[in-house]
Amino acid sequence: MSSTSRAFNLLQKCYIPSFKAPMRSTRRSLGFTPGINGMRSSSICFAHELLSPTGKIVKNGGKRSTVVPSHSPKEEKVLNNQGVGAFQKLPMVMPAIDILSSAQRKARNVSPTKGIANIAKRERNKAAKQLDTLMKELAVPLRTYIENFPNKKYLHPYECSLIELTFGDGNYEQILGRVDSLRKKLISVGKEHASLCAQSSTKREAEERLGEGLKKVQEAFNQGKNALDDLLYVAKSLRAMPVIDPHLPTLCLVGAPNVGKSSLVRILSSGKPEVCNYPFTTRGVLMGHIMLNYERFQVTDTPGLLRRHEDDRNNIERLTLAVLSHLPTAVLYVHDLSGDCGTSADDQFFIYKEIKEKYSNRLWLDVVSKCDLLEDSSTSACISNELDRYKAFGPEGAIPVSVTSGMGIEELKAKVYQLLLSQMTQIPAQEG
């Protein structure tokens, strides 16, 4: 054969693959997809670039392509929990008594494996299966709760603050830990007594060991069921908390207790907070919404702040600071100079100065409420002292309003709309 023919044959072997043997050997392992006109084609792909499920290009230099994710499972979990709303995805926690009743009923209905003729063997098989079923029916729901209640380190900082301020630092993790300990205890006791039942030599012995095992598992459950009751309370409390969208322009009403924040929320938005004449009416973050030119905005009513050092603030006050610290909010600060709210104008001035300095980067609007109760201060226009001027007029540029008479309400609404439109343009930059 000439050198030219040998070279040509060599090229054919290198560039024209044979599909006879490889097709048979790889058909099942690689899989096939329907092709044109019902023909079946191989899913093998010889490409230089592929897109991963997350959109990342995978380059492999023309070799067989392998799609790889761009994030590990833990990283994917972090990415999927950047926003708020995790509390509305919590699993429904059943009361302890319902879990126990359901597990006992299912265990009683378990029958021995078919085909066992020997009475003793059949009874010990039934006893072991019933105990195993009881153990699993009690332990599996607990495992589901532990796996589906969020880990705080994957939550939005605002939601982390809510957990700490509502239940105390570390108590949330402690409750989940107690539930997990109960799960492990049930598995240990259940397996131990199921094994004893399987070792029974007579029908009577199997029945006795079954009764003892059922009693021991139930005792273990009852000893730790308080953890489930606590988890049920946690789930109800967290699920009841309002969802705040961090990507939506938000107006946060701030001020001392009983200055009229809740009344203004009722006027400005769809929120319907309780309005009473006593301090700390608002004991949580209340939500409302404003619609403006087909755009939706959020309004939050927050607990009142007292004049004291930040370390001395109670958890109710710290909810307000959590909203201001972790959410992109514009501030509507409410002042009451009528003497009707229970916090003196002097104290309100110092609270205001502290909050304004701490959150100076926020869009800000001041309003003086209950102006129908104020005396005419027009003769005091020459006051130069900052505190005295505040006590007479409020901060510079503040809008005087009265919910009772309607004074200044329309002007306030117009300014609030402008503030929220400005906030809407800032949020993309803050997220970036």
Image (tube, rainbow, N blue to C red):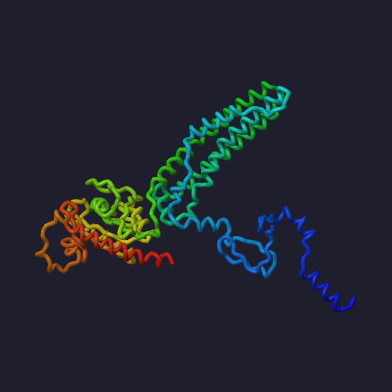
Determine the residue positioned at 49% across, 36% down. 225
Determine the residue positioned at 17% across, 51% down. 404
Rendering coords of residue 162 (x, y %): 40, 51
Specify the farthest residue to the front. Answer: 37
Query: Which picture quadrant has residue 137?
Result: top right
Q: Is residue 430 left or right of residue 14?
A: left
Q: Is residue 388 above or below residue 270?
A: below
Determine the residue positioned at 25% across, 48% down. 279
Q: Quadrant of the C terminus?
A: bottom left
Specify the farthest residue to the right. Answer: 1
Rendering coords of residue 329 (x, y %): 34, 60
Query: Which picture quadrant has residue 2?
Result: bottom right
Q: Quadrant of the N terminus?
A: bottom right
Rendering coords of residue 378 (x, y %): 10, 64
In front here: 221 or 130? 130
In front here: 126 or 64? 64
Specify the farthest residue to the bottom. Answer: 3
Q: How many numbered callouts?
A: 0
Rendering coords of residue 379 (x, y %): 9, 64
Q: Is residue 50 left or right of residue 375?
A: right
Determine the residue positioned at 49% across, 50% down. 150
Q: Is residue 411 left or right of residue 29?
A: left
Specify the farthest residue to the left. Answer: 379
